Image (spheres, helix red, strand yellow):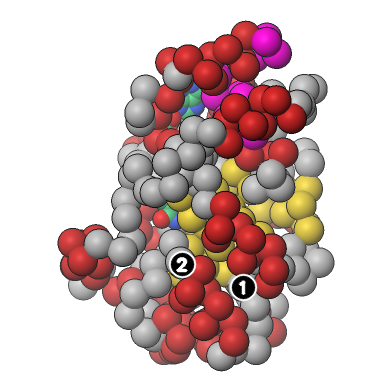
């Protein structure tokens, strides 16, 4: 697996397996399949309600802990210094782990400054090997960086050919924050797998549209965590390292950018209300 170095020198697989919208019942099987076909990085979140099932797969898989890279995330309800510390303990318990490779603030809402201070302490104690954020627009990201000691290693945001995040990437590159794409396949929306331009590039390389899109992220040094519940697609999505896109392909894909979110826009008041309202425990 190709690795990418984070700003604290920790190496993270450039590609991992994401379990958003995988039901708790299906998650253990999916994670075991993903590990069997070669994924070593797993992306979950307290809010996905499947950390226990991810933990069950980790326990069963027989792969040494140090070969795995496990990410989970702090939900909005648990923002703040004390609750973030409790949330880390709760995630560790559910996952059956004594440290996390990467811990992210899931959303830029609530007292995320308090959460960040707690995460900085847990990072120094070694419980969190890297800390980062998710869904932070560039302005909030820079403000967090300027007012804290530790710069996030990663910002996990919506990135795909229809929302390429060029300006956000420039800011992250400036501050040494790795861009990690959620929805790397645009969550299968916009009929992406039948897009004429992507199909033409796929045919040229004798690859699938999914493989071309995922390879495009890799060419941009963006970390990817595609999700599929199907083992054959998990394998397909991992088979990206025997071809590369040329400048012409990259230019054609660059032209597909709409410059805005196609999945969830964090600037919308309704989004802020909805995510603040989502409770994951009592
Ligand atoms: N931080 C955040 O706020 C946030 C938000 C969303 C997601 N995420 C993370 O990012 C991960 C990936 O994003 P995502 O799950 O939203 O979307 P995604 O990976 O872009 O797309 C998943 C969709 O694509 C389909 N698919 C996958 N591989 C395919 C292939 N080779 N050919 C055709 N269809 C394929 C899947 O269907 P099947 O499953 O039926 O194969 C599913 O419908 C998540 O699982 C989660 O870990 C984070």
Q: Secondary structure at mark 1?
A: loop
Q: Quadrant where the N terminus lies?
A: top right
Q: Nearer the viewer, residue 1 or 264?
A: 264
Span colored in magenta: 204-216
Q: Secondary structure at mark 2?
A: loop
Q: Is residue 226 magenta?
A: no
Which residue in the structure is indicated by mark 1? 152
* Label 1 CA crowd tier, 10 Å (few <14, some 14–19, many 20+): many
Above-or-below relation of 122 to 162: below
- The x, y position of residue 124, in whole percent, is 69, 84
Residues under numbered marks 1 and 2 in contact, where contact means CB atoms less than 8 Å apart: yes
Query: Which disc, if any, is residue 136?
Result: 2
Q: Quadrant where the C terminus lies?
A: bottom left
At x 74%, y 63%, the residue is 6
Q: Main secondary structure of the magenta part?
A: helix
Mark 1: C-beta under 8 Å from nearest atom of ligand 1: no
201 on left or right of 115:
right
């Amino acid at each position: 697996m190709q690795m990418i170095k984070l700003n604290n020198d920790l190496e993270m697989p450039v590609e991992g397996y994401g379990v958003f919208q995988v039901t708790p019942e299906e998650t253990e099987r999916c994670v075991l399949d993903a590990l069997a076909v070669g994924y070593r990085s797993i992306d979950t979140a307290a809010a996905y309600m499947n950390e226990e099932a991810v933990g069950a797969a980790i326990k069963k898989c027989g792969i040494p802990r140090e070969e795995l890279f496990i990410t989970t995330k702090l939900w909005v309800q648990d923002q703040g210094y004390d609750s973030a510390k409790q949330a880390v303990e709760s995630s560790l318990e559910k996952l059956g782990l004594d440290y996390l490779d990467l811990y992210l603030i899931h959303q830029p809402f609530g007292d995320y400054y308090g959460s960040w201070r707690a995460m900085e302490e847990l990072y120094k104690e070694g419980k969190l090997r890297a800390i980062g954020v998710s869904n932070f627009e560039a302005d909030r990201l820079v403000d967090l960086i300027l007012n804290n000691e530790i710069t996030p290693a990663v910002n996990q945001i919506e990135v795909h050919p229809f929302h390429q995040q060029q300006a956000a990437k420039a800011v992250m590159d400036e501050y040494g924050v790795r861009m990690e794409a959620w929805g790397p396949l645009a969550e299968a929306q916009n009929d992406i797998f039948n897009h004429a331009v992507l199909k033409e590039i796929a045919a040229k390389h004798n690859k699938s549209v999914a493989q071309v899109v995922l390879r495009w992220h890799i060419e941009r040094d963006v970390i990817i965590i595609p999700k599929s519940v199907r083992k054959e697609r998990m394998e397909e999505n991992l088979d990206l390292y025997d071809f590369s896109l040329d400048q012409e392909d990259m230019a054609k894909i660059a032209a597909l950018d709409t410059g805005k979110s196609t999945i969830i826009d964090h600037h919308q008041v309704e989004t802020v209300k909805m995510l603040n309202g989502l409770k994951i425990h009592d």
